[in-house]
Image: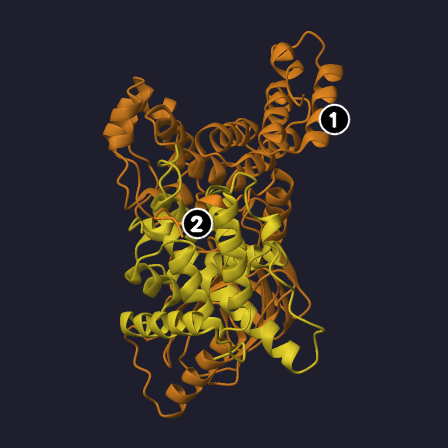
Amino acid sequence: MSERPPSQYFHTPLSEEQRERGWEAIRARLPAQRRQRPRINHAFALAAIALLVVSLVATRLIRPTRGAIDGALLETGIGERQSLELGDGSQIVLEPSTRLQLERVSGREMRLRVEAGAVHASVTHVANRPFTVVAGPVEVHVVGTKFRVELDPTDGDISVAVTEGRVSLSRVDGRPVPGTLGAGETWSSEAASVAAPEPPPIADASAGGTVEPRTPRAVARGPVLSKRFREHWRDGRYAAAWEQVPSSDFEAIIASARPEDVFAVAESARMSGHPYEAARAFDVFRRRFRSDPRAPLAALELGRLRLSELGAPLEAREAFEDAIQLDPNGAFREDSDARLVEALEAAGLAAECAAARDRYLATHPGGLHERMVQRRCR
Amino acid sequence: MSSTAISERVRPAPAGPTDAALVIAARAGEAWACEVLYRRHSGTAYGLACRMLGSRTDVEDLLQDCFLTAFATLDRLDDEGAFRGWLCGMVVRKTSKLIRRRSLLSRLGLRRSLPPPDLDSILSRSTPPDIAVELRQLYARLETFPGDLRTTLLLRRVDGASLEEIAQLTGASLATVKRRLKKGNTMLQDGEGGSGDE
């Protein structure tokens, strides 16, 4: 055999068709959302947690200090439903595509946070032990009852429905809530954004000379952008602005900041040559603030970054289609239609590319991208 | 024999985010990062699986399985930049498992016969005739070898992998790799076969 490895004589290219077919199959089976935190995603682990809680409560070992499973994240996938029985007999059922964080699990306090999806809770009353379910800014305080809490992470909508007993509601942002809900009563909040109440936008703040958010300290959630970031951003010094965003706080900022700030962070990342962070921030923006007029632009920018900078044409396609859906007749429609053609070509989807090209040429005769689009999908 | 790792042997570093950045993004639930990792490494993984199996049969399914497993277990990858090597290890172990399963089913009479190596479908037309003959003979002989010996020998003789690299890809110790190579080479020289499983 030759000195060089014979593997060089193998010819096993993966065709574009095979590649697309493979990716579509993989994408369909990817978990809905993964997080960089302790996460538990299986019935076995749920059972293990339940057993641990049962054991700890039974033996009165639970202390009010941070517990072993505090912070654990329970997740259910598409079509998956899981139930968790706590040591006091309380039952929590996670509906499909739900993320529930066990913030505190102890004999003196139970505090669960619905990050997405819906949970049903049937809570056993235990004297002097607060049982709280949090969804966005809303806290549901339970005495002993059955209820359901849902949080839609895309627009922040929260709903609470009580089946038995009574719960009291409060909000950390001070906005009004009914106070208590009895059996058969429901409450929902449309667009109850976690970031509310909104401090003045960057432009207003700079004009008035006050640049820090005026949100009361008690209401402030997570890190905020510095005064220096806003100054650099206002003056178009994007790289300098970006340097003011601590990498350790990046995720927390885009998850909790007001729309103006998330958009500013995304743009400063993009303009300073940080495509991954820019894409991440634009993605969060379009998901958190879907009714914001900048949401279609965020989706368009996200698609362009995915296509040109990150090399993910199918994910770019998703973003361009979202941009179109967000504002079908808006200013970014033509751009989105044209970029969609590029993404489909880059993904090797010839037939869909040709259809998108013909659609663009028919919809935007004499459009800005006409010549570029005409050359595609050949 | 080349000492370059299989996982580093292909192409210069691609443009765009590094594998480490992509792995971190994929862990955070970014599907686009998974897509880029898939596009970047699916060709390498596909080729490696074809060489391990000696044909294209079942390779697409196996490839999907490997990537799904990889994306589901990214938290276990200590060095984010080592995604390609980690994935290649997964491909090697899954092909090895597939061969063992096929062999077992065949022996139990649940499968008519093992799919024969189909080297013509995966060998380049420019392969020198003597090399093609040698490779066909090697794959035909290895059909009757236990799965682990077959994998070790293929990595060594076809891919030119170093002992350390084989150990890393198969998850075996260096001593085990040496033992398997010695035993496999002896069997090849003696014209022995095996049960098809170890």
* Residue drawn at (61%, 34%) of the image: A322
Foreground residue among B116 and B106: B116
Question: Residue A167: x, y in percent?
Answer: 55, 69
Foreground residue among A291 and B150: B150
Question: Residue B135: x, y in percent?
Answer: 50, 55
The answer to which of marks 1 and 2 sits earlier in the sequence is: 2
Q: Is residue B73 visible?
A: no
From the viewer's perspective, is the residue at label 1 or at label 2 nearer? 2
Q: Residue furthest top?
A: A366
Q: Is residue B54 visible?
A: yes
Quadrant where the C terminus of chain A sits is top right
Shade representing chain A: orange
Question: Residue A97: x, y in percent?
Answer: 59, 59
Q: Identify the image quadrant of residue B140.
A: bottom right
- On the image, numbered disc 2 is attached to which residue? A6
What is the chain identity of the residue bearing mark 1? A
Side of A312 where B156 appears, left or right: left
Side of B167 where A332 appears, left or right: right
Q: Are marks 1 and 2 in contact (CB under 8 Å)?
A: no
Helix or strand or loop: what does disc 1 sit on? helix
Which mark, residue A355?
A: 1
- Cα separation, mark 1 vs mark 2, equals 43 Å
* Residue drawn at (36%, 73%) of the image: B180
Dot 1 amino acid type? Ala
Q: Which chain is yellow?
A: B
Dot 2 amino acid type? Pro
Foreground residue among A283 and B115: B115
Circle 2 packing at 10 Å, graded few (<14), some (14-19), many (20+), is: some
